[in-house]
Image: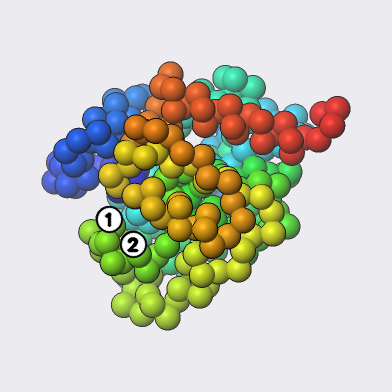
Amino acid sequence: MSGAPTDGDGGERSRSVESGQDAAEMRELLRLTAEEPDRTERYGDHPDQLVDHYGDPGGGPLLVLLHGGFWRDSYDRRHLSPFAASLAGHGMPVALVEYRRGGEGGHADTFDDVREALTRLPGPLVLAGHSAGGHLALWAASRLPDLLRHTVAVSAVTDLADAVERDLGSGAVREFLGEDWHELLPETDPLTMASPSGPVTLVHGTADGQVPMEQSVTYADRHPAQLLRLPGVGHYAPFLPETPAFTTLALALRNLLAEARGPGG
């Protein structure tokens, strides 16, 4: 699981918080106050087709964030707003994307929204996603390479067949892709899709209990990608401002934005 519940359903919240390190990190994430963006723009008519902007890109590279939540409608972008605001406070312009989510084979809307949002955002773009958002970022890296300068997948679901086997998210992949999920793997599974033509960085904590690091290891063995291991780090710590994991991720993103800006930028 990745993401924050959008409603006050105690049952939903209690099911999402498991024991151990990930649970402690998630509780810290949920305690953070959502940060209001500098502006919000829409890329479609659906209430979830919007982008929150933090900071001013000034015509330069833009960092685009895709949140997680196992593609479920009950989790939205708000839990990454403190992360986005903190990055903007350090001079990194951020676009935090919301997209349509939901089960019963709702994957087509989700992929369409990622495509539409990225197409409309001004480049150059550095794309970063967390958990299920990392899956979407890797999908975009394979399917939309001309739009991206670099792709970063943090604690990402990279191998959908393995996720089904492990029952990650209590049936999340089957819920997202529908009962014919296996037939859709060639066009939705980062592991079996064509290798991205642009650079990819994977970031994964060795103590991640939600999406095991083996997912990123398997992807890096199959595709050209740099794997940054975070020793002793769980699923959520990279997005908790003031933690060492956050500092590591923020520095990596800052460097990638500088590379996207180019010499003298």
Element type at mark 1: loop
Q: Amino acid at mark 1?
A: Gly
Q: Which residue is mark 1?
A: 169
Question: Left or right: where does residue 115 sit relative to residue 158?
Answer: right
Give the class, few, some or many, for how many residues have Cα within 10 Å of label 2's Cα (few <14, many ≥20). Answer: many
Measuring from the top left, give residue 179's x and y in whole percent.
31, 77
Residues under labels 2 and 1: Cα distance? 8 Å
Give the class, few, some or many, for how many residues have Cα within 10 Å of label 1's Cα (few <14, many ≥20). Answer: many
Q: Which residue is located at x 58 percent, y 60 percent?
A: 223
Question: Left or right: where does residue 75 sit relative to residue 147?
Answer: left
Mark sitting earlier along the chain (2/1):
2
Along the viewing direction, whichever of 214 and 6 lies nearer the viewer:
214
Q: Which residue is located at x 39 percent, y 38 percent?
A: 205
Residue 122 placement: quadrant? top right
Measuring from the top left, give residue 151's x and y in whole percent.
60, 48
Q: Do tag 2 and tag 1 residues touch (Cβ < 8 Å)?
A: yes
Q: Which residue is located at x 66 percent, y 36 percent?
A: 256
Q: Quadrant of the C terminus?
A: top right
Element type at mark 2: helix
Q: Which residue is located at x 58 percent, y 27 percent?
A: 251
Q: Amino acid at mark 2?
A: Ala
- Discs 2/1, front: 2
Residue 198 placement: quadrant? bottom right
Q: Which residue is mark 2?
A: 163
Question: Left or right: where does residue 19 sit relative to residue 132?
Answer: left
